Image: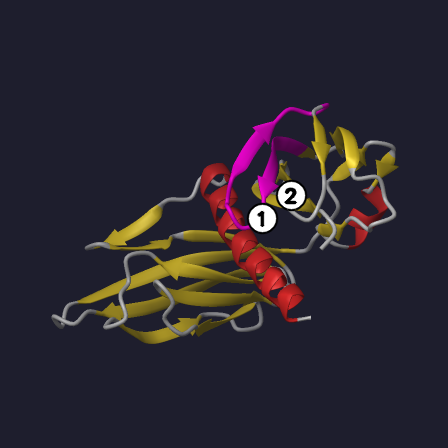
């Protein structure tokens, strides 16, 4: 349905934002400023991800020039239409590193250049256990880092999450769709996964030294 498509789009956009926040907080990544413009200097992605990253403080009159990726086998890039700011969408194709670069030309003629290191990793389930109530979602997370809870699965209960050797749980967030409200919670907390909430677990691969997230979504 149209409503479901709209909701999926909202979820996708919100996840893109939360992944950036997680990356900035955990990597740690700094933003490269040029005048009032900002773009992430370093981005971590998983193979198969396609995520949009905004050029902060960009305006419609700006022109994005010479957008390119140094290794298109690892990732590809494209500029999206202006909505609040300009967004660069990056598609992670295979494990490896590459550099995204572009120039922003402002209405006054001034130009600002940006470079961002993109690190792409293959996904491996970092969790030994991911229990909500009586249901363990570990096997579902073996296949991909996002799982939607079916209507027949328990939605309420305490969480019990443990990491595999070589991984560390950095934070757990109980979040609301649409509003952007995130609440940091402790392992063992009671939650409800429904059409308004999802669970996001930020983990660190201590061997490869990168951080990312696995998520459980309430039924749509």
From which residue to which does the magenta span run?
Answer: 168-188
Characterize the local packing of mark 1: few (<14), some (14-19) or many (20 or more) Cα atoms within 10 angstroms: some
Q: Camera-side residue: 18 or 95?
A: 18
Q: Eyeballing the image, is 49 above or below 80?
A: above
Position of residue 171 measured from the top left corner of the image (x, y, whole percent):
59, 32
Which type of secondary structure does the marked residue at label 1 adopt?
loop
Q: Is residue 171 magenta?
A: yes
Q: Is residue 51 left or right of residue 63?
A: right
The residue carrying mark 1 is 177
Q: Looking at the rendered structure, which numbered label has been put on residue 121?
A: none
Look at 16% across and 72% down and name the residue there.
Answer: 107
Which type of secondary structure does the marked residue at label 2 adopt?
strand
Mark 1 and mark 2 in contact (Cβ < 8 Å)?
yes
The residue carrying mark 2 is 197
Position of residue 37 measured from the top left corner of the image (x, y, whole percent):
26, 57
Position of residue 130 measured from the top left corner of the image (x, y, whole percent):
78, 36
| Residue 49 at least partly seen | no
For marks 2 and 1 on the same chain, the one whose residue lies earlier in the sequence: 1
Look at 78% across and 34% down and name the residue there.
Answer: 156
Quarter placement of the N terminus: bottom right
Look at 51% across and 40% down and name the residue there.
Answer: 181
């Amino acid at each position: 349905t149209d409503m479901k498509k709209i909701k999926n789009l909202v979820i996708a956009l919100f996840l893109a934002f939360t992944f950036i926040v997680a990356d900035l907080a955990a990597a740690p990544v700094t933003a490269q400023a040029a005048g009032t413009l900002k773009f992430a200097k370093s981005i971590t992605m998983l193979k198969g991800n396609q995520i949009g990253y905004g050029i902060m403080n960009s305006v419609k009159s700006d022109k994005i020039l010479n957008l390119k990726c140094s290794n298109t086998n690892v990732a590809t890039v494209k500029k999206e239409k202006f909505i609040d700011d300009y967004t660069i969408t990056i598609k992670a194709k295979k494990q490896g590193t590459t550099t995204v670069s572009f120039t922003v030309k402002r209405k006054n003629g001034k130009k600002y250049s940006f470079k961002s290191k993109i690190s792409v990793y293959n996904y491996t389930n970092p969790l030994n256990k991911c229990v909500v109530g009586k249901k363990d979602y570990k096997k579902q997370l073996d296949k991909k880092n996002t799982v939607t809870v079916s209507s027949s699965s328990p939605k309420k209960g305490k969480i019990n999450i443990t990491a595999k050797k070589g991984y560390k749980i950095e934070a757990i967030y109980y979040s609301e769709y649409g509003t952007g409200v995130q609440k940091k919670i402790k392992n063992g907390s009671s939650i409800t996964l429904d059409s308004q909430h999802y669970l996001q677990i930020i983990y660190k691969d201590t061997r490869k030294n990168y951080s990312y997230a696995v998520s459980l979504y309430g039924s749509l």
